[in-house]
Structures are given as structure tokens and as C-alpha cells.
Image (spheres, rainbow, N blue to C red):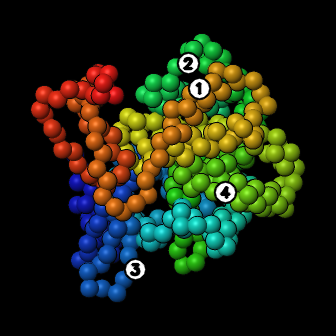
Amino acid sequence: MKPDPITQIRKLLHSSGHIQPCTLTPLPSSGSDRQYYHIVFDGADLPDLMAFYNPCVEENRAQLEFTRHFKNLGLSVPEVLATDSSETIFILPYLGNRTLFDMASKGVSEEVIHYYKKALSDLVQFQINGVKGLNMGLAYPVPDFDRQSILWDLNYFKYCFLKPAGIAFNEHLLEIDFQHFADVLVQSKPDFFCYRDFQSRNIMIYQDKPWYIDFQGGRRGPLPYDVVSLLHQAKANLPEDIKDLLYNHYISQLRLVAPQELDHVQHHYNHFVYFRLLQVMGAYGFRGLVERKAHFLQSIPFATAAVKFRLKHHPLNISLPEIEQVLEQIIQQYSKIEIANTEKLTVTINSFSFKKKGLPIDLTGNGGGTVFDCRGLPNPHRVAALR
């Protein structure tokens, strides 16, 4: 029988001394198979808590070790307050529901820039000091950002974005580019803590300071990866001048701690921007084109715009012709898609084959609905006069 997370969470709360009645509210987890819950104690003046259920014990052990290590370094990560004997349920402090992404989405104010700068200053500490004494033997699924990891991500882009999107490519030539790109990326020194998912959705703003979550996939890796992940997060859509400002702040902080690393960061930075774009498009393809989750579908045009800008203003200084030609196809296919940002009702009328492709993709994320007109109407796509 599949375990009931809510029952397990209540048992853990009771065994850890939280005997008061409480309400557990599920929280959304768009890009993860984890199940999160907000815990509110009924009629008691007690701080809210958060719980999560994750059946992957290896990943949970990595989180437990990384949390302990980073807390000892004084970094703002939420303490694990309790975990059950199965190591699948964790209780943590509740850090509210405001992320740096939420703030930036409303406009890049001085306050937003302040939090980004603080996050980048802390990132240097994660990367340089965080790796010292950290038990990387518990890193999951792999301890190092190596050539094989790079090829996994590149193939994720191929199989989860290019193929579902119907992008044409030469299999042999694309593989040659993947191998060449991997050779270039592994030249960046992999001796630091790589957070792996250091982006604004994983930075909570609570009690006027940033807190960092979702670092359990961290491993040894190169410095450029994480700063690129934060500044070039597609849907955050930071203005280019702000990206430059924040990148320069990161470089200034790195200069204070590890000046000897500046040259290789600056040399490989643009390579990792392209790599990260391919990687996130793979994620958007799997979660969006395959699983049809609205948030990820909505992110594709933002990633496409970032690719278009990059190719025009910061072209690669290495030869990857097949990768570049598939990126040009993606630009042609997705640049014209616009996601309406409105609270008004929108009705979309289209024909589709339920038998072949199921329901039409819902880009709203609100659950929407579909009304079927099953009469024998001509298909406008097949009748020239109706096109």
C-alpha cells in the first residue's frame, strides 16, 4: 500500500513534541515530484512549519548533510527540525510564500537588486567555502559535474525538447556538436560546490533576508554554472543591463575570496549561458510539451527570446553548427507565441484530434476547461476555402 504522507507527517509532528491540532495544506510543486505541506497549528500561538514527503531516500540524505554543513557555515538555509525513521518525511521552518522570483516579476526595483546582490554574495560562500569539508559522497545522483553529466543534459534537450517539438536535425552532426561542447565545458575547473538549481524561485525572502532551498542536487562543479542559472533564468527575464550589473557584483565578490579563479569564470561564462539555455529547454520540454504543465509551457517563449538575443549579441566562439541551426528553428517556431498576462476570460477556438493528441494544451495554468462540439463540421485546416 502506498504510504499516506499526511498521516506520516502527523505522526512525526506528534513524536517530535508538536502535539497540538494542526491543519496541513498541500503546496504546489510544479517542477518536482516532492509533496510539500504548510502546517498551521489550530488556535495556538506557534510558528508555522513546512513538511515535505520525498520517497527518494538518497536525495533526502544529501539534503540533511548539506543543510547541517551550510548551517554551520552561517548560510541562510532552513534547518531540518525533524525527520522520520524512513527518511522520507522532513519538518522544516515555514519561510512564507514570497520568492525573489515573485518580487522580480513585479519589476526590478532597488529592493530586488539588493536581494539579488545579497544572493550572489552568498553564492560565492556556497561555492568556495561550502565545498570545504562537505561529504560529497552523499551527493545525489552523482558527486561531480563531469562530462557524462553534461551529455545527459544535452541529450535531455534532444529527447525532451527537440523531438517533442518536431525540430529537424541531423542525429550524427548533433552528436558531434554535443561531444565538442562537452569537451569545452569540462575545461572549466570543477572544484567548487555547484548548487545546481540556484535560481530565483529557490530563494525565499523571509524576515527581510534571502533564504536558500532546493540545494539537495548539489555536487562538485564549475563556478560559472550557478551565477548563469540565477542571472539567465528565462522567465525571470531580467533586463540585460541588470544582468551586467549583477554579474559585475558577483565578479567583485569572487575577487575578494578567490581572485585566482576570475580568468576561467570570465572565459567560460558565455559557454555556460548557452549550456544552461539548452538544459532548461529540456526541462521545459519534458514538463511542458510532454507533461503539459502550464508554467513550463509559458516559459518556452522567454527561453526562446533569450536564445535569440544571445545568438545576435553574444555568439559562441566555438563551432557548433548543428546546435545553432536547431536554435534558429526554435526561434522561428516559438518567437511568435505570446502568453497573455490578463485576468479577463479568454476563449480559444480550435480544431484538434483527441484520438491522436488528447486535449489541446492549456497555457493558462488555471485548470480551464474544454467544451467539445462533436457535430460533423468541416475541418478548416483541410478545406482550402476555410483556411
- Tell me the CA gap for discs 3 and 2: 54 Å
Label 1: which secondary element: helix
Q: Tell me which amino acid carries mark 2.
A: Phe
Q: Which residue is mark 1?
A: 326
Q: Tell me which amino acid carries mark 4.
A: Pro
Mark 4: few, some, or many residues within 10 Å (few <14, many ≥20)?
few
**Which one is in front in this view, the residue at disc 3 or the one at disc 2?**
2
Q: Tell me which amino acid carries mark 1.
A: Val
Q: Which residue is mark 2?
A: 169
- Upstream in sequence: badge 2 or badge 4: 2
Q: Which residue is mark 3?
A: 47
User: Looking at the picture, how far across and down is residue 271, in whole percent?
Assistant: 72, 37
- Upstream in sequence: badge 1 or badge 4: 4
* Quarter of the image where one finds residue 287: top left
Is 103 placed above or below 172 here?
Answer: below
Q: Which residue is mark 4?
A: 239
- Upstream in sequence: badge 3 or badge 2: 3
Along the viewing direction, whichever of 297 and 123 lies nearer the viewer: 297
- Upstream in sequence: badge 3 or badge 1: 3
**In this picture, residue 268 sits left or right of residue 37:** right
User: Looking at the picture, how far across and down is residue 68, in whole percent?
Assistant: 56, 61
Q: Tell me which amino acid carries mark 3.
A: Pro
Question: At 75% across and 35% down in the image, what residue appears?
Answer: 315
Question: At 73% across and 58% down in the image, what residue appears?
Answer: 241
User: Looking at the picture, how far across and down is residue 48, in whole percent?
Assistant: 38, 76
Label 4: which secondary element: loop
Question: At 52% across and 74% down in the image, what residue appears?
Answer: 206
Callouts 2 and 1 close, C-beta under 8 Å: yes
Give the residue at the far top of this rendering. Answer: 172
- Tell me the CA gap for discs 2 and 1: 7 Å
- Tell me the CA gap for discs 1 and 4: 25 Å
Question: At 51% across and 32% down in the image, what residue appears?
Answer: 333
